[in-house]
Image: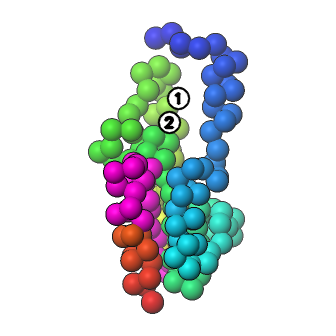
Amino acid sequence: MVDRVSKEVRSYNMSRIRSKDTKPEILVRSYLFSRGLRFRKNDKRYPGSPDIVLPKYNTIVFVHGCFLHLHEGCKYARMPKSNVEFWENKLYGNRERDERNQKELEAMGWNVITVWECELKKDKVDQTLEELYNQITSQL
């Protein structure tokens, strides 16, 4: 299958994809901050550089994109039809790394919560954020 855009345009498009401070991350952080929770963001001292670290609640929150982290059963987590071998290695590698990081953090005594990008869509966002807040604060 031929790519629809040139190599240069594809490279530019992929370079615009951020690894931190994504819109879903900012949405979650803004909500938690407005509810009075204080946290560290993208702390490199922990496996996987968690998006949100709440030391007071002994909780770590990852905000994952459904495509890049292969959210199981999600319509946004589909395998591209071109360059399949590359994408399989990349996406399944991401999933394995996420699982490894989560196990490591749990072994260190952290409660790990994953929020998926699809859970932050307009129809679900309020419920998701409220449940996240309740999950975090029930840890005390």
x and y percent of residue 101 in the render?
Answer: 52, 62
Q: Quadrant of the C terminus?
A: bottom left
> Does the segment drawn in magenta span residue 113?
yes
- Residue 53 is labelled as none
Q: Which residue is mark 1?
A: 86
> Residue at the left extreme?
73
> Does the segment drawn in magenta span residue 124?
yes
| Cα–Cα gap, marks 2 and 1 | 5 Å
Residue 50 seen anywhere in this rendered image of the structure: yes
x and y percent of residue 56 in the render?
Answer: 57, 85
Q: Pick the residue in front: 65 or 102.
A: 65
> Residue at the top extreme?
2
**Range drawn in magenta:** 109-129
Q: Is residue 60 above or below residue 119?
A: below
- Mark 2: few/some/many CA within 10 Å (<14, 14-19, 20+): few
Which residue is found at the position 42% from the left and 21% from the top? 81
Would you say 37 lies left or right of 126 here?
right
Residue 108 seen anywhere in this rendered image of the structure: no
Would you say 65 lies left or right of 135 here?
right
Q: Is residue 71 above or below residue 115?
A: above
Q: Which residue is mark 2?
A: 89
Look at the numbered discs 2 and 1 and tell me whether their residues touch, using CB distance below 8 Å.
yes
Amino acid type assigned to the residue bearing label 1 in the image:
Phe
Which residue is found at the position 51% from the left and 10% from the top? 2
Amino acid type assigned to the residue bearing label 2 in the image:
Asn
